[in-house]
Image (spheres, grey):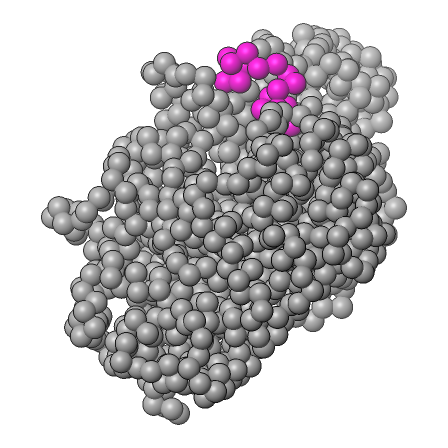
Amino acid sequence: HKRAALRSKTANPSKNDGLLRSLVEHQCHRNDMPHAKRKTVSVCKVPEEARLSLATDRASRNSDGDVMHSDMNDPALIPRITILKNIINFFCEDTDGSSQGSSGDLNNSSQNGRRLTLGGMGGLGKTTLAAMAACLTELRSEFDHILWVNLGSYFKGGSDRNNLSYEMYLDCVQNLCKQLNVSSVFNCEVFLQPGDSKMNISSKYIQAMENLKHEMSKIVQGMKILIVLDDVWSHEDVELFNFGEHVSSLFSILVTTRILDQEPSSSCLSIDVGLMSQDEGRYLFSIEAGLERFANAQDNEAVDCILKKCGYLPLAIRTAGRLVKASRKIGPELNTLDILEIVIKMSDSPRMSPVISLLHRSFSFVANGFTSFSLKLLFSAFAVVFRRDDILRPWVNLDDMNILWKGLFCSADMNRLQLRLSLREYKLTKTEQIADLMCVMGLLDRKYGTNFRESKQQKWYRVHHDLMWDYGKMFCSLFKIVDGELVKCGLHGISCCNMCFEDSGDMTFSNNTIVWNKTIVDFFQEGFKEGNILNPETYKINWLPLHMIKAGLFRETIDLLMTEKFLEDQVEAKGFENAIHFILLLIRSYEKEANSDTYCSESPMVLVILFIDGFLSRFSSLIQLDDTNKKEIGRAFILMGVELQKFSKWGKSLDLFSNSLNVFKSLNYDDSHPDVTYVLKLIDSCAIRHVILVNRDSPNRLKLKIPDACDSLKNIRKISLDLISHPGYGIVQLEGKNRVGDSVKGISYEYKFLGVGLKDSTLKADYDGQCIRTFNHILSVPLGLFYEGFPLMLRSDIKFDPGVRNRETVRIENVIKGLHASTLYQITHEGLICPKVAPHLCLGISSFQTLFLVAHDSLNRAVFKNFSALPKSKKTIIMNEQDNDNVNDQSSQSYGNKCATKLELSSHPGMAIVSASETLPIVSVMNGAQVGGLALGPVEHALSAKMNEKNHFTITDKYEGVAFTIGLKENLEIGKSVFISNYAGPWIYEFVINDNGTISPLISQDLVLGFKVPGCSKFQC
């Protein structure tokens, strides 16, 4: 009888109340899920927002597996019977292709590969309709499994993507496997090789995704499957989930999207979900407001006015209905018309959307204006303070909420406002009472769960919707108080004026955020000392360090993070992997607040990560751990290594990845295991290659991932140096402290070289159409030398020795002109970065790994195959010079070349030290000296060198006359490049050969020559 009723032709909600209510009662309010007679029907996981709307009184389960209950009542179902009927008819056709009661094009698709799209703007209820359909017995009895994937969650939070990457798609597939309760281990890893072209890299990722799709097709073969793809941002992604292409069993897809499909498939049918009709709006409003029907035409007229102001948008109507329900609880003496008139009064601000306007009026049901203001302030403080960078609306337990609101009540400014006294007039004396009232008003959600080290159930709350959080932020940006007095605008004479205070909103929001976070931290610390805080451990673990960061207490935060007790509590509460994930979230918040997201290599957060590394290493060595904990520690090392790469600590991140690899090897994982495959990929990611100048048509050129050309910009624009030429990679800063450049006497500056690394470490920059700046440094080339193969660097402002400009005006001015020209770049419409004075060149990636200094025990050290021959060449040359004083220079040079040794490496088989460029440019500002780079390259291009009596390694043959150097001794540190030159300035040319075949600077033998590529010793596990 339900199927026949569902297929009725009428769409009038008033004539379908019985059907809708029977569906709701039969499907949404049952504690046990319905089962078909011929098979077991799986239940799709409904998104939290839809689940709260459909079945909020049923038990739900959080991400940690704890059972939690939400007790919000009166589910607001959008009464769109026609759409629901069409969805059921489309997917529940008989196997012969016919469908009783169906009409139109909905019957034109074949049984297998059916696809239906629900399209329309946000807030129309597309997800709710899909969730309602997925809960109906008609649909459940048609399929063995109904699976749900929320694609929109991958593209929120400032993502610059609108289609799935390989990693995103793999996560989706693993999620589907989890819903099917099958193994989610796939052998579809992508292996990239040095020198892979853009097309080759793309084809590898595409092939891997196709392999994943084919593997999923094997899994679903024989099952009747419906996949709900919620919030699709790119219709191309839908094809990735069309597993029905390779199966013979029933397979269908239901899509919800706000994006118009420009090229719809012939098998795809669409339903446009529009704004609600008047009858539908009245029905939804009455459900949310708790009103069965309206008493008279006057009430109907008021409701229609509300619907019009809400624009017939379901979300706005739902909010208005909840306000009416809240007002009936607060003011039971008010009649329906009085309540409706309160809701009708909208804000005069043209900047506020209907929903924000309704929220702004949501507290007007409290007759006392100041009590209404107090509720707004408490809600705003809750929304702003209890926010994480990764979760806008996290769940917060009642005890932690109590700390915030009590702290506000007791603060000096708020105490003068007498907030608590104003709430007592309405018998709102406890935090729980205020929070429950906000749940009734639709501002907060509520559920039950347990706290850390406790088994007792407690209430947890969160902001109901992103729009509600936006309202809390808006109120915070308008709230101004000085010495306990609210600041009022001069024009209207009111506080929190959204018209007059809007221009200063960002500064006000920032100030209030700091003050409110400091308020809760101070109140907690004082109450903790006095023993007045209930369940302090939960707040201390989940919120205290974050609130300290937001309050600007940076030194105190570092001290807290570097205590073993804090780390032990985190591990006990969350486990190793989740604990480290949370602490790294705190580190990102610290960098955002303290260093403006710069990730400076000298940040104290580097010390925090190294402290955690030591803690985990000690912990794992002292305590016998099971395999699960070992695996989590291995993954924690990976998380920390990836985070260190953001600080340009490539060498230390390599150590952490190596630690992780050792952990996985101890678990007997082979090289095909996903964790081992991933960590090996990360180890390879530490092999950073320099950014250099290349010819504009070079295959090694770099292209930025930018939407438009930036060459005509007049204002500064924020850009990310992500690369479209190398997907998943970007321009990063190389390891090491700022070094001083002083090749020209009297001039100095600090600099760091650039490389190509993983996207997570990509630099952010400001571009004004001429210069690219980041970290208070500017993109430049050394000494303005625009030659192929020359490295790019970030340079500080130029410093001059006292009086140098007066002594050598002409020379210095010429140098300054050259240095200035080296900072001018054009970003083309292709994404190329070209020097304006040398437009034939552009930024590119070096073909080889640059030679630089590493620790003497580093896996990256260079071990020379013929190292024992180098000291012999030195002795032979000295003896020859002593015995042949009358030999001419040409003969001596020829004899010296015969004594040269090929710089082949045993640490990197088949490789050798090579020149980074074909020719060595002559630098006029360095008195005509030559300078060139050294790199790791194929042995057939190996350089040959000899060692003279001064312990100089001089190059022979093509590059005769230049020698190894590390530049100034002030720059002697790990990460310093080693190059060749004949410059006669104060540079370091002296080296020593070690017994193990490595080469060190004579004045610092704890350092050796090496690369960012591990040698073969890495694989001797």
Q: Nearer the viewer, residue 851 or 523?
A: 523
Relative vertical location of residue 535 with respect to residue 215 in this rendering, above or below: below
Q: Is residue 747 magenta?
A: no
Q: Position of residue 833 (x, y in %)?
A: 76, 53
Give the percent coordinates (x, y) of residue 501.
42, 80
Residue that protrudes farthest toward the front in the picture: 1
Q: Is residue 453 visible?
A: yes
Q: Identify which residue, 899 or 668, lies in the foreground.
A: 668
Q: Which residues are magenta?
A: 662-681
User: Which residue, as the protein is rendered here, is positioned at the far bottom?
Assistant: 491
User: For residue 289, what is the image quadrant?
Assistant: bottom left
Can the viewer see residue 780?
no
Residue at 45%, 46% in the rendered image:
30
Residue 878 image-quadrant placement: top right
Left or right of residue 871: residue 448:
left
Point 44% across, 85% down: residue: 296
- The secondary structure making up most of the magenta span is helix
For the point 63% across and 58% down, the residue is: 5
Front residue of 182/595: it is: 182
Residue 732 drawn above or below residue 18: above
